[in-house]
Amino acid sequence: MRNFLSRLSEISANVCGWLLMVLMALLFLDIVCRTVGYPILGVAEISMCVMLTTVYLGLANCEVARGHVKVEFLTERMSPRMAKWVAVFTGILSIFTLAVCSWAMTMNAIDSYTGDEAMAGLVPIPVWPIKAIMAAGIILYLLATLLNFSLTLRELRDRRPDASA
């Protein structure tokens, strides 16, 4: 499961990189076209959609690599076992929060699809595909968090004989 999730999060991170390259090219082209008096319609809306997509699709890869910011001011002053228990507590909070966010984002994407929601602008852009990608990204992030949480629990269990210290 870890290899599959690692590969899936790596693919999503690569998609983020490619999307940003496309965004840069589109913005450059729009600047050139604006200079000669022919702006490309909808570039601002597309840019916003791409940026939202890259943020949500990149979260899981960062979690798999355990690259999210942690404030270690307190945990580095604790015993390793106590620090693991704090990690368990924060893991439970993270999983709960991500589960709620995943559910809410999925429901929001479904509502957007059924309501035929579109972004107002010069070029109306349907919102549900972006919301669906955001929901998929946060669900992938939740799965990566669950996997890392299970690894933390396993590490805590494997060090159980040291509990008497």
Image (cartoon, rainbow, N blue to C red):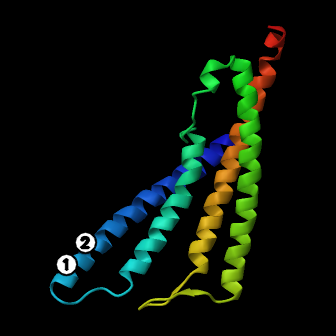
Residue that badge 1 annotates: 32
Q: Residue at x 68, y 89 (%)?
A: 115
Q: Secondary structure at mark 1?
A: helix
Classify 61 as above or below 65: below
In the rendered view, does 164 fall on the left or right side of 42?
right
Quarter placement of the C terminus: top right
Three-letter code, disc 1: Val
Classify 118 as above or below 152: below
Residue 74 drawn at (x, y percent): 62, 26
Q: Secondary structure at mark 2?
A: helix
Residue 116 drawn at (x, y percent): 64, 89
Which quadrant would residue 113 be assigned to in this image?
Answer: bottom right
Residue that badge 2 annotates: 28
In the rendered view, does 107 fall on the left or right side of 47?
right
Q: CA distance from mark 2 to mark 1?
A: 6 Å
Residue 161 drawn at (x, y percent): 83, 12
Residue 76 drawn at (x, y percent): 60, 22
Tell me, yes or no, whether the two marked residues, 2 and 1, touch with CB atoms within 8 Å. Answer: yes
In the rendered view, does 58 fall on the left or right side of 143?
left
Three-letter code, disc 2: Phe
In the rendered view, does 12 fall on the left or right side of 75?
left
Classify 62 as above or below 56: above
Q: Residue at x 82, y 13 (%)?
A: 163
Q: Residue at x 21, y 83 (%)?
A: 33
